[in-house]
Image: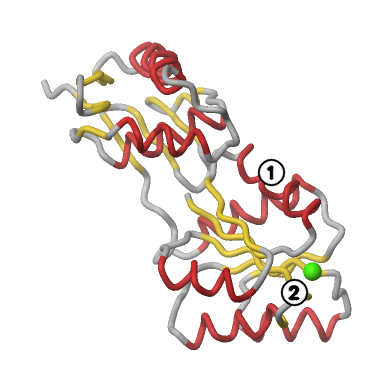
Amino acid sequence: MRLLLIEDMPRLRDLLIESVHSAGWRIDAFATIAEAEEAVATTPYDLLLIDLGLPDGDGLDLVRAIRRQGRRTPILVMTARAAIDERIAGLDAGADDYLVKPFNHGEFLARCRALLRRSPETAPPLLTAGGLVFDPATGVLTCRGVETPLTPRERAIVEILMREVGRAVPKRKLEHALSEFGDDISTNAVELAVSRLRKKLTGIEPGASLETIRGLGYLLSEMKD
Ligand code: CA
């Protein structure tokens, strides 16, 4: 899952980035409408998190513009404007949900999950490999109905690998995903993460294999019987 955030308060922006990373989702954060508009036009996002009082305008104008362009990406508006008519204006402008600041971190993530799974057209399909099933909206990995705990970084890697089952994923793609978590990517950070994940995945699903292909990257495949 890839989220976009527009929030001009650096402290809150950092907290929200941390919160989203804890769910295993990726996030691009911006402080102005201009920067965010450009990103929305070029990157497919699964959820947009939009603050309203921004240095270069009103976030609601951006919400309206996105809907005018026919984009149906779920939008969560986050603002201190708490009056009932302001909430109505936000939803009528095209937001799918409205969260009044200050809000609770747990509620914020629950609303994100709800928006990510809400519409059948925008909800991401479940990813499978053998008996492994990963839900990108919730970050939950199960094998034959049993949930396997994953760290946020493992969730990000599992999602990338499971989108490409049967195809090699370049190492730099995983490096990039880990670096988004603010990690200092040493040469073997990816190897280490993959090796831990391999133990976890093949431990619960012997029919899955996660191979290192020298010079190419990593390959998650399911054995057919
Ligand atoms: Ca603001």
**Point 59% across, 51% down: residue:** 113
Above/below status of 75 relative to 223 = below
Question: Does the Cβ of the disc 2 residue fall within 8 Å of ligand 1?
Answer: yes
What is the x, y in percent for residue 114? 60, 56
Residue 19, numbered label:
1
Residue 176: name its quadrant. Answer: top left
Is 192 on the left-hand or right-hand side of 24? left
Residue flagged by tag 2: what amino acid is it?
Leu
Residue flagged by tag 1: what amino acid is it?
Ser
Front position in the image: 21 or 201:
21
What is the x, y in percent for residue 92? 66, 86
Residue 54, numbered label:
2
Is 52 on the left-hand or right-hand side of 153? right
The secondary structure type at the circle numbered 2 is strand
Residue 212: name its quadrant. Answer: top left
Above/below status of 114 relative to 217 = below
Check disc 2: other Cα within 10 Å, few if <14, some if 14-19, many if 20+: some
Above/below status of 187 relative to 31 = above
The secondary structure type at the circle numbered 1 is helix
Front position in the image: 28 or 156:
28
**Cβ–Cβ under 8 Å for marks 1 and 2:** no
Front position in the image: 178 or 88:
178
Check disc 1: other Cα within 10 Å, few if <14, some if 14-19, many if 20+: some
**Point 75% across, 46% down: residue:** 15
Measure how far apart labels 1 and 2 are at the Cα level. Answer: 21 Å
Residue 220 in view: no
* N-term-proximal mark, 1 vs 2: 1
